[in-house]
Image (cartoon, rainbow, N blue to C red):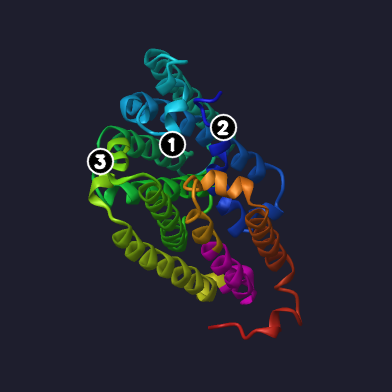
């Protein structure tokens, strides 16, 4: 279980994002089951990828002060067992995806082939990352961000809703920011030699360079989300412009996350989220607030508080 990194399954909440923003969360029944099965599939698939990646990185992980305690790096689990376990989890994940296709999506125009396509693309991209792309500067963080984009696109396909371009740009900019904060923290916490030994691409980065990239990524995340809230298609879907009230939450969450990851020993985004109660409160408030806006923001009187853009 430790090699599966179950705590990292929280990242697959991105698969459920379309359920919230499409408004299908109000339908109950099938959309919730479809979204759950898609999340489960990506949890298993991601765990399989982690195990394969740990097999590929076993020598470098043994040089890292924290990663050397992982089961494969520490010798508690053999690389062969890790490889078999990783492949097995991937096969189970695709079985879950196929079950979702046959049970819920077979009568849809694409019969769920789009879901299978995004799932396969996620796996292919992550295997490329494990074997090659993680050693290419800039591409390494872009690939991590694209992994989240593919999660969200698979989530949209799972509940058979159109994929919005905003889903791509907002998810990409947000997760690029997260990937860059992790890379910066790793470089700052380890000396230059050790940082390069545990991750080859770290030799090509400097804190100043990553600070510049983070400034760009943060600006992208705030601007693209703001434009999404103001977009005509968003206002029409929510039947009001009240989603703008979530912008301060997004800005606060980004800034607080950046502040926390600059503290020693907090370069893991999962640990930052799981251990910080305020971040949990921000995420929960955002999700609940978005749901309330979708449900009640369209009511007469409430809707007219803000001018609807045309």
The quadrant holding residue 309 is bottom right
* In front of the other: 17 or 75: 75
Question: Residue tagged by mark 3?
Answer: 135
Res. 38 in view: no
Reading the chain from its start, which is encountered first: label 1 or label 3?
A: 1
State left or right for residue 97 relative to residue 54.
right
Query: Which residue is tagged 2?
Result: 6
Q: Is residue 278 above or below residue 272?
A: below
The front one of 159 and 109 is: 159
User: Where does the magenta region start and end?
Assistant: 235-255
Residue depicted at 52% across the width and 31% down the height = 5
Q: Earlier in the sequence, mark 1 or mark 2?
A: 2
Bin the neighbour count of mark 2 within 10 Å (Cα to Cα): few under 14, some 14-19, many 20 and up.
Answer: few
Q: Position of residue 124 (x, y in %)?
A: 33, 35
| Mark pair 1, 3: CA separation | 28 Å
Dividing the picture into quadrants, the one containing residue 117 is: top left
Inspect the magenta stretch and tell me whether residue 68 lies in it. Answer: no
């Amino acid at each position: 279980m430790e090699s599966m990194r179950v705590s990292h399954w929280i990242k697959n909440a991105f698969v459920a994002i379309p359920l919230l923003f499409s408004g299908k969360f109000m339908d109950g029944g099938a959309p919730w089951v479809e979204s759950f099965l898609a999340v489960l599939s990506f949890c298993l698939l991601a765990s399989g990828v982690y195990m394969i990646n740990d097999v590929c990185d076993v020598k470098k992980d043994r040089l890292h002060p924290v990663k050397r305690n992982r089961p494969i790096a520490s010798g508690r689990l053999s690389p062969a067992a890790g490889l078999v376990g990783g492949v097995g989890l991937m096969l189970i994940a695709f079985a879950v995806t196929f079950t979702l296709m046959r049970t819920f999506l077979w009568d849809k125009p694409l019969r769920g082939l789009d879901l299978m396509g995004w799932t396969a693309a996620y796996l292919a991209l992550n295997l490329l990352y494990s074997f090659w792309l993680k050693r290419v500067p800039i591409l390494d963080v872009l690939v991590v961000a694209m992994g989240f984009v593919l999660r969200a696109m698979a989530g949209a396909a799972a509940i058979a809703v159109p994929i919005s371009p905003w889903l791509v740009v907002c998810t990409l900019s947000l997760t690029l920011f997260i990937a860059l904060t992790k890379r910066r923290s790793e470089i700052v916490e380890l000396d230059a030699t050790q940082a390069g030994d545990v991750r080859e691409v770290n030799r090509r980065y400097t804190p100043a360079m990553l600070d510049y990239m983070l400034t760009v990524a943060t600006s992208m995340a705030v601007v693209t989300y703001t434009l999404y809230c103001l977009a005509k298609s968003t206002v029409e879907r929510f039947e009001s412009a009240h989603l703008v009230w979530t912008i301060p939450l997004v800005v606060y969450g980004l800034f607080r996350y950046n502040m926390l990851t600059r503290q020693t020993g907090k370069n893991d985004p999962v640990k930052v989220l799981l251990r910080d109660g305020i971040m949990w409160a921000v995420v929960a408030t955002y999700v609940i607030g978005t749901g309330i806006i979708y449900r009640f923001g369209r009511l007469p009187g409430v809707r007219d508080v803000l001018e609807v853009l045309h």
